[in-house]
Image: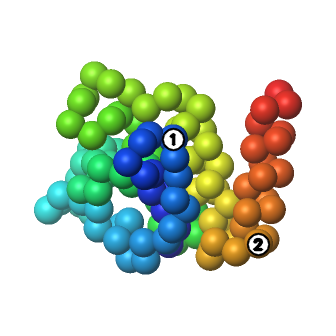
Amino acid sequence: VGSVVIGAELGREDHGSIPGKCDREGAGTNARTDPRTRLNWCPNNPALLGCNVGAGIEVKLRLRRPNRDSDFIPLDQVLDTMLHELCHNAHGPHNANFYKLWDELRKVRFLS
C-alpha cells in the first residue's frame, strides 16, 4: 500500500508509506457494501492525498481540500498524486526503481 502525504505547506510532499492505513482511511461503516460511499474517499489524515490498494485494485485520490468542500486541490497536484499511486502498481515500495519510474512519467506528462 502506498500513499502520498503532504507537509504543512500544500505541495511540499513527503512520499512516505502508511501501510494498511489507506484502506481504512475515510471508510464509513458501509464503505464496502454501498458503492456510493466507496466513491467518496475522505481520509481522516488531512495531509493524505492518495493511496493505492492491492497494487491498483483501487487507487484513491483526494480532490478537495480538507474541511473545504468547495475548494479543489489543484489539478497538477492531483495528477502528480495519481502518477505516484500508479507507480505503486509496478513498484510497491518507495525505492530507486519507484522514483525512477515516477520521474519518467512526470517527464512524459509535462511533454504532452
Q: Amino acid at mark 1?
A: Gly
Q: Estimate the x, y position of residue 48 in percent, counting from the top left.
A: 39, 54
Is residue 50 among the parts visible in the rendering?
Answer: no
Q: Helix, strand, or loop for circle 2?
A: helix
For residue 29, side relative to residue 77 (left or right): left
Q: Position of residue 12 (x, y in %)?
A: 52, 47
- Precedes in sequence: disc 2 or disc 1: 1
Give the image location of residue 92, x and y in percent.
63, 74
Is 80 rendered above or below residue 28? above
Mark 1 = which residue? 11
Query: Which residue is situated farthest in the front direction here?
Result: 8
Report the colour scheme: rainbow
Residue under the image location 51 percent in, 41 percent down:
11
Circle 2 Cα neighbour tier, 10 Å, few/some/many (<14 / 14–19 / ≥20): few
User: To which residue does mark 2 refer?
Assistant: 96
| Marks 2/1: CA–CA distance | 22 Å
Q: What numbered label is drawn on residue 39?
A: none
Label 1, residues with CA under 10 Å away: few <14, some 14-19, many ≥20: few
Residue in view at x 65 percent, y 66 percent:
89
Report which quarter residue 75 is drawn in.
top right
User: Mark 2 or mark 1: which is in front?
Assistant: 1
Locate the C terminus and report the quarter of the image it occupies: top right
Q: Is residue 49 visible?
A: yes
Q: Which residue is pictured at 51% across the width and 68% down the height?
A: 16
Report how many numbered discs are placed on residues in the image: 2
Q: In this image, 82 relative to 7: left or right? A: right
Q: Residue furthest left?
A: 29
Please state if 85 lies on the left or on the right of 30 as rendered. right
Q: Are the two marked residues, 2 and 1, in contact with CB atoms closer than 8 angstroms?
A: no
Query: What's the residue type where badge 2 is placed?
Result: Ala
Q: Position of residue 42 (x, y in %)?
A: 28, 48
